[in-house]
Image (cartoon, rainbow, N blue to C red):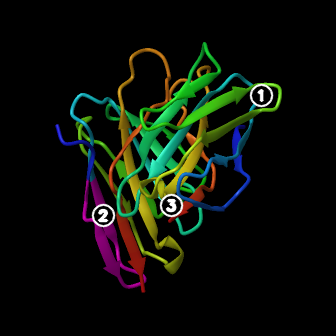
Amino acid sequence: DTGVSQDPRHKITKRGQNVTFRCDPISEHNRLYWYRQTLGQGPEFLTYFQNEAQLEKSRLLSDRFSAERPKGSFSTLEIQRTEQGDSAMYLCASSLDVGSNTGELFFGEGSRLTVL
Amino acid sequence: AQSVTQLDSQVPVFEEAPVELRCNYSSSVSVYLFWYVQYPNQGLQLLLKYLSGSTLVESINGFEAEFNKSQTSFHLRKPSVHISDTAEYFCAVSSPHQAGTALIFGKGTTLSVSS
């Protein structure tokens, strides 16, 4: 397995357009996380899935954002009606729940969004 | 709620000098603590972690961090840095009592090592 992969790596869009990012986690990992990282900031938690269930959402995840993990494998993050403030690096991470929360996450390289 | 404060946004050092990157956390429950590193144009990678037991933890590339509960700190140190250590370093916290809770990250410290 080559790790967590994200697609596309870069996306430039115009304000008001919709964008979708895809994340393929490490195959045996049942937890999947989305984070957002802006310049000069650390990663900020957006949401996470345990298998196909979305268990937690940050208040940062406005109504324009939606995430899915339909079969408990890959996940998509869609942003509708993009705004310039959505410009950021969107990070996906996965982990294996072994009954205790050790919190070790494996990150992809991110999808960079630029909204013009 | 948990939070992490990284006290230095940038740390410039010369090669072979020692370095300390400071991290303080706030939590009302017990914590797990992590340092992640992000090399230029790469994803975040786990550097080391404290879960329980010995308060001093080490990485394979010479970094170490010490969990200090009384000072709520988890500072990262290396006695002699290399050019290749130039990267962004993030301290992060989670809780063993909150299953599935995501990591909370600090804002990061940019370590710049020059010759």
Q: Residues within 10 Å of mark 3 (few under 14, many from 20)?
A: some
Is there a contact, CB below 8 Å, between mark 2 and mark 1?
A: no
Identify residue for label 2.
Answer: A20
The outermost residue toward the left is A1
| Chain of residue at mark 3 | A
Mark 2 → mark 1, Cα distance in angstroms? 37 Å
In magenta stretch: residue A19: yes
Within 10 Å of the Cα at label 1, are there few (<14), some (14-19), or many (20+) other Cα atoms?
few
| Residue A6 relative to residue A42: left or right | left
For marks 3 and 2, give the one nearer the viewer.
3
Q: Please give the name of the residue rendered at 24% of the width and 44% of the height, measured from the top-left corner.
A: A74
Any magenta on residue A88?
Answer: no
Q: Which of the 4 quarters of the picture holds residue B107?
A: bottom right
Name the residue at 60% across, 13% down: B53
Residue B78 in the image, given as x and y percentages of width and height:
58, 42
Viewer-proximal residue among B45 and B29: B45
Q: In the picture provided, is B102 more to the left or to the right than B56?
A: left
Q: Position of residue B77 (x, y in %)?
A: 62, 40
Q: Which residue is mark 1?
A: B28
Q: Which residue is mark 3?
A: A37
Task: Please provide percent x and percent y for residue B17.
Answer: 60, 52
The stretch of residues the image draws in magenta is: A6-22
The amino acid at mark 1 is: Ser
Residue B85 is marked as none
Q: What residue type is disc 3 on?
A: Gln
Position in image of residue B75 (x %, y %): 67, 39
